[in-house]
Amino acid sequence: MFEKISQIFKVKELRNKILFIIAILVIFRLIAAIPIPGVNQDQLKSFFENNQFFGLLNLFSGGGLSSISIVMLGVGPYITSSIIMQLLTMIFPRLEQIYKEEGEAGRQKFNQWTRWATVPLAAMQTFGMISLLRSQNILGQISNFEMFSIISVAVAGTILLMWLGELITEKKIGNGVSIIIFAGIVAGLPSSLSQLSATFDSSQLFTYIILLAVVIAAISGIVTITEGQRNIPVSYAKRIRGNKMYGGSSTHLPLRVNQAGVIPIIFAMSIMLFPGMIANFLATSSNEVVANIARSVGNVFQNQIFYGSAYFILVVAFTYFYTSVVFDPHKISESLQKQGGYIPGIRPGKNTAEYLYRIINRITLSGALFLGIIAVLPFIIQGFSSIKSISIGGTGLLIVVSVVIETVKQIEGQLVMRDYDGF
């Protein structure tokens, strides 16, 4: 490991890229420390501690939401916009054609539409969040001009982080948006550790050991599932053109256990978030019937068993949904057939598509169940542990480990490209 680190800093171009990304992350953390005025910090802290899904939303904002900073939404609206645009490609074939068939120009146009859609989404999310915080007495009375100013600043903060993320992505060392979220998660570790040391109870030592073992097991599982894949053997028929023979080789088609990454958790979080937010809005309604219904809905979503069960089911369902979006067995089968490839023992065409569909459904089941367990890991820990100061975020672990693996792979790829013989 130390040898690779020394090799990284020996390559000037790679060293400059890493230092540039570190500088971007420093700027991000400085911005995230600037709060908007008029926030009751004590009530804000209590609010996030008692609302599991808002804590998860804070995770995807890079930690900016918990302090109501000028980048309180983080890159959340950009992620939402990207998801919406991907779903629209399934509804409107023309969008899919622009993205897949028009090359780099089409992708740039698609990305530009995604950026434009981020602006209204950020404005709506800011308005909803500020209204909710006012109803919880976390923010005082705000005039229309102050509301407009806060929305403008929050939208500008989101656009700034989106731009910083794209600058990181251009360096080809990891995905910029993921690295910004990763930085927000890691930045919260010192305060969590200090809180743990301040509330350490020696009589709970065995529980601490069990929790540490759970964390290590979760990290090992994340690495295994993230890297896990099933290799489908593929053979290519021999073809003769003129006096030369082509093909006749054998390779494999890798099918990843977790094709969807962390996207299903984001989908499920969005679905679980809205009922609670709407209930909080309507709980203070002057209409007694509406207020009682809203309070009942809010109480249901505060129930840990109901929330955890619904969250688990949605994550599993969205894992299958998103896998079907990113992996199309029929297109893979057509591509193999056009290139003269086939799976040994399986007829090309429809039979190959059915075989791939059956295999991807089986391996996706294990990936979906694993993602569901990771998503509800905090509920499981809180149910069996009496240590309330410890909160193990399974989603946070998944993001951190996935980003580290992806970044290390890209750095190693650039090292190999510059000195192949040395590796």
Image (cartoon, rainbow, N blue to C red):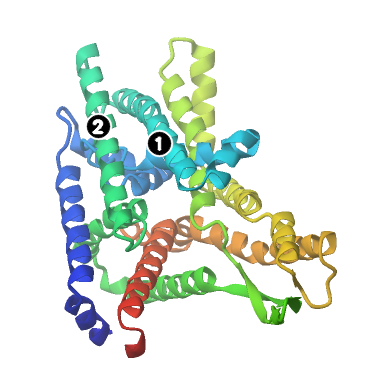
Say the numbered circle drawn on residue 112: 1
Q: Position of residue 46 (x, y in %)?
A: 29, 41
The C terminus is located in which quarter? bottom left
**x%, y% of residue 141?**
22, 17
Residue reaching furthest to the front: 242
Q: Quadrant for residue 109, please give it.
A: top left
Which numbered dot is residue 156? 2
> Horizontally, is 29 left or right of 89 in the view?
left
* Outermost residue to the bottom: 422
Q: Residues within 10 Å of mark 2 (few under 14, many from 20)?
A: some
**Disc 2 residue type?**
Ala
The residue at the far top in this view is 286
Mark 2 or mark 1: name the one nearer the start of the chain: 1
Task: Compare residues 311 and 114 and report the one nearer the observer.
Answer: 114
Give the label on residue 305, or none.
none
Q: Of helix, strand and loop, which one carries label 2?
A: helix
Q: Position of residue 139 (x, y in %)?
A: 23, 26
Corner quadrant of residue 199: bottom left
Residue placed at 27% from the left, 24% from the top? Answer: 151
Question: Is residue 376 something one can see in this rendering?
Answer: no
What is the C-alpha distance between the residues marked 2 and 1?
16 Å
Location of residue 270 in the rendering, given as x and y in whole percent from the top left corner: 49, 39
Residue at point 21%, 68% (across, down): 13
Q: Give whichever of 91, 64 is nearer the camera.
A: 91
